[in-house]
Amino acid sequence: MSADPSLFADLLDEDGQTGPVYQRIAEAIATAVTTGRLLAGERLPTHRELARELRVAVPTVSRAYREAEQQGLISSTVGRGTFVSGVSGIPHLRGTPAPGQPADTGRLDMAVNAPARGMHEELLRMALTAVSTSADAGTLLGYEADIGSYDHRSSACRWLAHGGLDVEPRQVAICHGGQHALLVALTASLRAGETLLTEALTYPGVKSAAQLLGIGLSAVAMDAQGLIPEALEEACVSSTAPRALYCMPTAHNPTAVTLSPQRRQAIVDIARRHDLMIIEDDVFGLLAQDAVTPLAALAPERTLYLTSLSKTIAPGLRCGFLAGPPQLTDRLGALVRATVFNPSPLSTAVAMRWLDDGTADRLLDWQCGEMARRRTAAEHLLGAHPAISHVRSAALHAWVEMREPWTASEVVSLADGLGMTISPTMYFLAGNQTLPRGVRLCLGNAADVGTLTTALRTLTEGMERGRPTWASGTQV
């Protein structure tokens, strides 16, 4: 099956970007792959065919294809053509090896934002033994209440209080991880065809969820301090009539920015003025260096607050929490029931045991200390490099901005050749802005601080030896 060349023209018409054409074509390919408009195995138009369709020079298309191939989106074979690799070709989405295939143990994954591991495995064995030998173990084989039992929601409330949010059990739904909580929150707040505002750089999961639900995304400009309140005000009075704002005000993914109290209050004031629902993603909140007030505490009447144990404890627990105004509880329960029926009793039992017996608190304390050491190492090693203009880190990741002529895609490509996987920055683009000269480095997957330090030193040494190939627009 061959892809229709007009698809690319349509995508370029949609984006309205003013950046280099080759980059826009590559980003259009990424968008089409991640949203399912291009499927694995589809053959792309030849360089000449696409150039004719888009009315650009053939070398521009060739450069765009090279860019997309570096990101794992497509692959080319002499004599056969260029084909879509699909999601499985994107390094940070490959997942575990297929049965019988060896794991690539020599690579360091800095694309998936996962917490560091300490004593987690031994504590899990102990928890599973306790859960399986408890008097009510048989109940784990049955159905659970759609939003979780009252006792479990009470435990969740105590955990949410650590982050400065005071809610009652009747306001909380237990979900199958943070992504599920996000899907429920979006479905509860918007209908297909309505517009969701989000930061110009945003969590890729909200893009895929919005695409699934038929919700339009509109990007709100950011600066070095995060989402700009004036840009939010402007977006609220636009012709798109947005219904809700999704944002990550603490340890933002990918930029690691935490909004100031002044900006938080300004955002709440704007939301109230324009009757805007807020979906606050606080998955990194408990890892923040300084205590901050959630938007949900400032505007409880219009905020759906979501978090999970995936970034603080372990993603395999698949335990998320969604809190909102009491009048929405029945709606949240219906949506949980319609999507997963109920949270997994077994994984929820393990998670709640850890919340109740203090294990989660101990793991959180360890995680905060471990990640502080990793962030310090990253800022020390990367901040001194002449090609790097700025490093900001928070929670589990660092945002690294390069000086010209380095670009984000060139750093991703260099890292790939050195045995490190970094997410292409284009995955975080929510709208029509130019691709920034920054990359997100996830610091939690290295076995220890020493392993991370060695990898980052290898990367900086590689940047010293190598030079960008395409930044000037001419191959050198």
Image (cartoon, grey):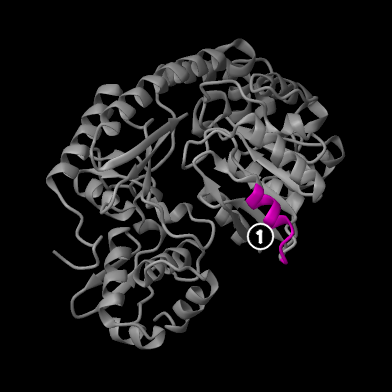
Q: Quadrant of residue 263?
A: top right
Q: Is residue 259 above or below residue 439?
A: above
Give me the residue at 25% from left, 54% from top.
Answer: 405
Answer above or below: position of 298 versus 440: above
Residue 414: x and y in percent read 22, 49
Please determine whether, in this image, residue 184 is positioned above or below residue 90.
Answer: above
User: Is the residue marked by circle 1 packed among few (<14), some (14-19), or many (20+) residues within 10 Å?
Assistant: some
Tell me which residue sits at (40%, 26%) in the image: 116
Quarter in which the N terminus is drawn: bottom left
What kind of residue is marked 1? Leu
Residue at 72%, 56% in the rendered image? 236
Where is residue 249 shown, x and y percent of the image? 60, 37
* Callout 1 secondary element: helix
Tell me which corner region of the image, top left, top right, bottom left or bottom right, holds residue 70.
bottom left
Residue marked by disc 1: 213
- What residue do we see at 31% from left, 55% from top? 409
Q: Is 189 in the magenta?
A: no
Near-viewer residue (2 or 341): 2
Judge from the rendering whether residue 288 lies leftward or rightward of residue 80; answer left or right. right
Q: Is residue 232 magenta?
A: yes
Let me know if residue 54 appears in the view: yes
Given the current orientation, which residue lies at the most extreme right position? 327
Q: Position of residue 336 (x, y in %)?
A: 72, 44
Q: Write down the quadrant of residue 297 in the picture.
A: top right
Examine the residues drawn in magenta and state their main secondary structure.
helix
Q: Quadrant of the C terminus?
A: bottom left
Q: Which residues are magenta?
A: 230-239
